[in-house]
Image (spheres, rainbow, N blue to C red):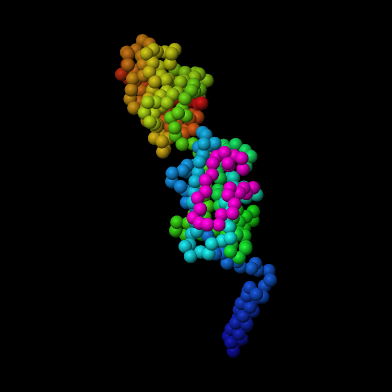
Amino acid sequence: MKHIKIFSLILFSATLIFNACRKEDNPNLPKLEKFTWLPLFVKDAASDNSISGQNPQSFKGKFVLDKYFESDLNPQQVDIVVIKNGNRANVKIIKPGLTSFPATVEITGVQLTNLFGAAIVLGDNFEIGADITTAAGKKFEAFPITGNSYASGVSAQPGARPTLVYIAACTFSKTSFNGNYTVTEDSWQDFAVGEKVEVKPGVGENQIAVTAYPSPAYGKNRRPMIINVDPASFAATVPEQVIGDYDGAQPGSTVRGTGTVNPCGDNLTFVLKIKVNGVDYDASLKLQK
């Protein structure tokens, strides 16, 4: 008898909870909106995939906006918008009033600079999305100040791209390595910190040339050190080569080693073996533009 009373009380309580949770009985619950169109952004492979950190004004991006689900009912219009560095309080319109899809949109570095009123610097990122006004006249924002966007869950769908991101980053170009660089470290002590070393683009596609060892104070017949750079990892390889003649030593001193370079052309770091009179000596060299 006791068990029956307890079960009846539980059943009664569950019924109250169920009824209390019905949406129509709770005016505090938000009204659910049916969203009928999801954007699909695809970058044009022939356009810039990122913004050059060395020359952001040269950026020319192009992308296509289409619907993710083929059966989606087209909206009244779509406005292409962009935010800079995640700031949702400063949404700018790139292209308003799109009504037919797929639609091709172009964006440039000059346009982004003018939209946000500031120069693009290394590390800036621009996220592009779509403000959508549905066929029923309801507007959904890509970057609302509070809450998630309408497309916050669709990113998990296969092939979904509800937004695009362009980042100002440096890509390797040998032409960026050109000038007199400052020595910040030289364990071989041919150069004092603060002295200059000439750096130039090399003959090969991904080569740079550094005229360092021997320094003018310690040698002659100096030749530039030719460095091969992996443009993807920015790792540097210094194949063994003759670099010049040290005073008082046998002619034809050589160097070999490895290192890394900053893709913007700002600095270079090497770990080297310098061979003089047939003997290898360790050296580390760091240069700053």
- Residue stretch in magenta: 90-115
Residue 147 vertical position relative to residue 85 in the rendered view, above or below: below
Residue 59 vertical position relative to residue 76 in the rendered view, above or below: above
Query: Which residue corresponds to the image point at 65% horizontal and 75% vertical from the top-left?
Result: 24
**214 in the magenta segment:** no
Q: Position of residue 271 (x, y in %)?
A: 41, 28
Query: Which residue corresponds to the image point at 51% horizontal and 26% vertical from the top-left?
Result: 289
**112 in the magenta segment:** yes
Residue 276 vertical position relative to residue 99 in the rendered view, above or below: above
- Residue 5: which quarter of the image? bottom right
Q: Is residue 73 visible?
A: yes
Q: Position of residue 226 (x, y in %)?
A: 37, 25
Which quadrant is the N terminus positioned in? bottom right
Camera-nearest residue between 31 and 46: 46
Camera-nearest residue between 239 and 34: 34
| Residue closest to the far bottom | 1
Q: Position of residue 11 (x, y in %)?
A: 60, 82
Query: Which residue corresponds to the image point at 51% horizontal and 39% vertical from the top-left?
Result: 59
Q: Position of residue 258 (x, y in %)?
A: 38, 30
